[in-house]
Amino acid sequence: MQRAAARLASWTAPQPFTAAARAPRAARRMAAPVQAAAGSDWLSQDERRMLHAVYRVGDMDKTIKYYQECFGMKLLRYRDIPEDKYSNAFLGYGPEETHFAMELTYNYGVDSYDLGEGFGHFGIAAPDVYKLVDAVKAAGGNVSREAGPVKGGKTVIAFVDDPTGYKFELIQREGEIPEPLAQVMLRVGDLDRSIKFYTEVLGMKLLRTRDNPEYKYTLAFLGYGPEESSTVFELTYNYGKEGYEKGNAYAQVAISTKDVYKTAEQVKAAGGNVTREPGPVPGIGTKILACTDPDGYKIVFVDNEDFLKELEQK
């Protein structure tokens, strides 16, 4: 009886289910669409641009010389970080303030990398691919696919391999070519899912798609501007292929943003996977944010104001 009395004494009657009790759950249900709306607003306000592709090379000096002599690129800037045992070289066809660049990373003592099968190629647009191929050969470059029309189309292309093994597609284009660094090609396992991510999370536009049933693949081109004047992503879906080994060579693409903190909230609200919270890079100070796409490819957002300050110090 005493134990029963003790249990009875400690028992608390349940509180009636009131509107006040329902309020916290209702607030949580309302928070998601409110956050999504706020993220969408920021997406329309932000000004984004593809800045550079980051990847690892086994011989920095040899690669710089190869890009200069075979592709006609310029060395835009170079930095060595001995305390962290790596160096970076930025190459391209125009100033980084307005042009895309290739950011080469050399890690001290590492002379080779596994390219995997997910990364496809970088694209370079040129007025005459046949002449460019001749120039590459004259400079000692490795042409892995001779110039000629693409399968199933008329565009003249060729492929060149750099010293580490990265493939560069040479793409013939008529008229003015304001940005020769034309594309970054990645292979994806679900094209619709990837298009949704690149448009809704990264804020890119779907520029065009091309299906090639004869060769069992589909392409989607996405970016922040037209293909003729800016660098874009070329996503490739091979029929029935749902995943790819990434290797450890290709790293990421960097994209500018006006505010990495607001972009982080927008990415999360849109369902993106943030892998590095926004904040400054140790030793450099530039604020960045990192996330991954549905296939695991890394995207880094860079504070544009910090990026421009970084360029002033080169």
Image (cartoon, rainbow, N blue to C red):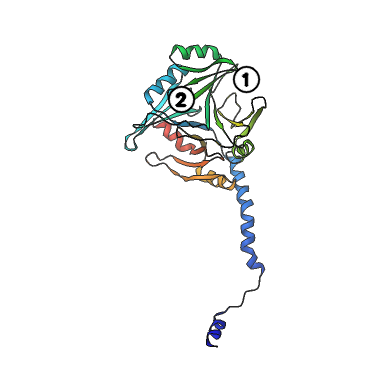
Left or right: 305 in relation to 155: left
Q: Please give the residue where the numbered disc 2 appears in the rendered image.
A: 165
The image position of residue 166, as x and y in percent, is 47, 26
User: Which of the 4 image quarters holds residue 57?
Assistant: top left
The answer to whether 308 is drawn above or below residue 163 in the figure is: below
Q: Quadrant of residue 230?
A: top right
Horizontal and vertical percent position of residue 169: 53, 22
Q: Where is the N terminus found, in terms of image quarters?
A: bottom right
Closest to the observer, 42 or 132: 132
Out of 233 and 297, give the one closest to the viewer: 297
Task: Decide which of 233, 191 is in the foreground and name it.
Answer: 191
User: Which residue lies under the disc numbered 1?
Assistant: 151
In the structure shown, which secondary structural element does the residue marked by tag 1 occupy? loop
Residue that appears at 37% across and 40% down: 283
Q: Amino acid at mark 2?
A: Gly
Residue type, mark 1 in image = Lys
